Amino acid sequence: MMLGSRSIGRLAAIFVTVLLIQITVVPHFRLNGYVVDLPLVVTLLICLYLSPANAAVMGFVCGLIFDLVLHTPFGMTAMTFSIGGYIAAGVSQQIATKSAATRAVAVAVLAATATSLFACTGALIGLEYVTRRELGAIAIVTAGAGMPAAMALHPLVRWAFPHEVVNFSE
């Protein structure tokens, strides 16, 4: 089955809206001094509905768009989102119960993992500001905030997908 132009438009609208909320609203609401990464949460939630290869592409595109507004090396977020998306799609195939709560738990764990991967990648290329903060606290805040965010965003993502697993092309 193909991902239609209606679904692509809906996904673009969802992601752009979440990105704007991330830039304008989220920095004013910190948890333990950390900002929640809503684009990561929505990307992982979207990738739960895709095949692994398509989820990697979706993660890369969403990460590349998010890279445009970050002050990190260009492509670092795209790489992290791409790997996270691929893993999310693989995990989704193994989930027996595909309820919103189960997907929210999966997104929370995957978001914490992707955040850790981002920090480890930053440490490998010598970025001090990525490793300056406590990685465990950042991962816990990301997972803790990712679960209710995924529950809230789940109906929007279901609205974008008419079917359970979607491929870009056959």
Image: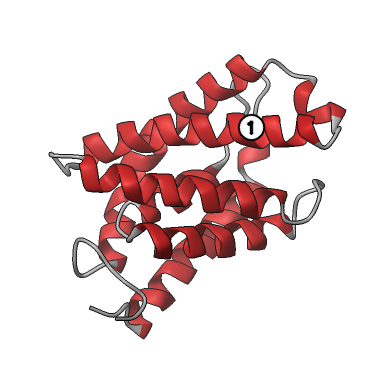
Vertical position of residue 143 compared to residue 44: above or below:
above
Labels in figure, total:
1
Q: Position of residue 7 (x, y in %)?
A: 34, 75
Front residue of 25 and 151: 151
Query: At 45% across and 51% down in the image, what residue appears?
Result: 85
Q: Residues within 10 Å of mark 1 (few under 14, many from 20)?
A: some
Q: In the shown orientation, is residue 149 left or right of residue 65?
A: left
Q: List the residue tagged with mark 1.
A: 35
Q: Label 1 is placed on what type of residue?
A: Val
Q: Is residue 125 visible?
A: yes
Query: At 52% across and 29% down in the image, what residue appears?
Result: 142
Query: At 37% across and 33% down in the image, what residue appears?
Result: 148
- Residue furthest out toward the bottom: 5
Query: At 63% across and 27% down in the image, what residue appears?
Result: 30
Q: Position of residue 56 (x, y in %)?
A: 48, 58
Considering the image in quadrants, where does the C terminus appear? bottom left
Q: Position of residue 29 (x, y in %)?
A: 61, 31
SS class, disc 1: loop
Q: Residue 33's quadrant in the figure?
A: top right
Q: Position of residue 9 (x, y in %)?
A: 42, 77
Q: Is residue 153 visible?
A: no
Q: How is the image coloured?
A: secondary structure
- Residue furthest out toward the left: 97
Vertical position of residue 83 compared to residue 10: above or below:
above
Q: In the shown orientation, is residue 169 left or right of residue 94?
A: right
Q: Residue 34's quadrant in the figure?
A: top right
